[in-house]
Image: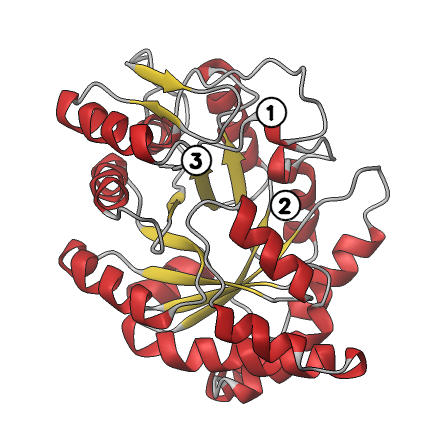
Amino acid sequence: MQISEPRCKILLIDDDPDFVATTKTVLAFRPDYKV
Amino acid sequence: MSQLTQALEIGKFVVTGEIGPPKGVVLDKCLHDAEMLRDYVTAINVTDLQSAVMRIGSLAVSARLVERGLEPVYQLTCRDRNRLALQSELLSAWALGIENVLCLTGDHPALGDHIEAKPVYDLDSVQLLKAASSLNQGYDMAGHELESVPSFFLGAVVTPGAEPLEPQVIKMKKKIEAGARFFQTQAVYEPEKFERFMSQVQGFKVPVIAGIVILKSVAMAKFMNSNVAGISVPEAIILEMEETKKDDRKKKAVEIVARIIRQVKPFCQGVHIMPLGWDDLIPEIINQAELGLQVRTRRAEE
């Protein structure tokens, strides 16, 4: 699964659902978060 | 085996530096910057289109460092290349004498000077590490056997000041599982936060080299606070810089950086100094940070 936001710095390619869910939660509050 | 590998494997405290390739074809200035670091660092990172700004490539500059007897840490990002190009470039790097590779996802083109560029991101940093580890074992990503095999020393990055920290720690673990054998961090300005980070990742038993960016001006500090995720220059440092006369800016920069190095040194296995053109300050930083022993040792070895 890939999360990418063209305007900001986040990009994540990962198949681990827990990690993707954690990252999505963080992004909801911190759209500039970079992993 | 690279000097960086050897130093980290025996638990030596290392200093690494960094140079940025130019936007052009003449390498004199960046090679001069690298020469300034020669006596003080174990290896020199060469950035790969840093901040997504088009420049000459890190492969060419890293190869030139090898020619001069300097050891590069070749930075490779996933932004501009698919898996074919990344693997091919890794094999090319090995053929050019490059052993240390820092695997990064890379800043998005929207942050750089070609905002219309198509981002590739076929892989991210973890998958790039897996691909490079696989090459080390003699196979490409498709499982095909290589005719001859490299032996890269693979590194990755982490942001100790990120809030929340949890995703950083999870991804750091993934990077280690994928083959990262050392870490260089985003710039550290808050030693207490760095100590907390290190206490969380101590169990990973992988060397961490703390990133140190020389602060050149108050404007730079404020810019990083506003624009660089995971970096926070404390107000006290900004105030300290504001109260410094313009002529004393370099002296103050040395003082601040050396102080941070002294504070983080007990918790990490090295520092990665990013001088951003102020390479002439490195000797004084190392002296004031009380890292002089390493300088003497390296000179004695030569």
Residue in the picture at 13% in, 58% down: B203
Mark linked to residue B187? none
Are discs 3 and 2 less than 8 Å apart at CB?
no
Disc 3 sits on a residue from what chain? A
What's the residue type where badge 2 is placed? Ser
* Along the line of sight, the residue nearer the viewer: B56 or B199: B199
- Locate residue B280, reporting x and y percent: 73, 74
Q: Residues within 10 Å of mark 2 (few under 14, many from 20)?
A: many
Q: Answer yes or no: are tags 3 and 1 on the same subunit.
A: no
Q: Which residue is mark 2?
A: B62
* Along the line of sight, the residue nearer the viewer: A6 or B136: A6
SS assignment at label 1: helix
SS assignment at label 3: loop
SS assignment at label 2: helix
* Along the line of sight, the residue nearer the viewer: B302 or B115: B115
Can you tell which of label 3 and label 1 is closer to the viewer? 3
- Locate residue B68, reporting x and y percent: 70, 57
What's the residue type where badge 1 is placed? Pro
In three-dimensional space, the C-alpha distance between marks 3 and 2, rounded to whole angstroms, equals 31 Å
Mark linked to residue B109? 1
Q: Answer yes or no: are tags 1 and 2 on the same subunit.
A: yes
Q: Which residue is mark 3?
A: A32
Q: Reply above or below: B119 against B60.
A: above
Residue in the picture at 40% in, 20% down: B123
**Quick check: B249 left or right of B16?**
right
What's the residue type where badge 3 is placed? Asp
Residue B246 location, quadrant: bottom right
Can you tell which of label 3 and label 2 is closer to the viewer? 3
Q: Reply above or below: B301 against B155.
A: below
Q: Reply above or below: B151 against B219.
A: above
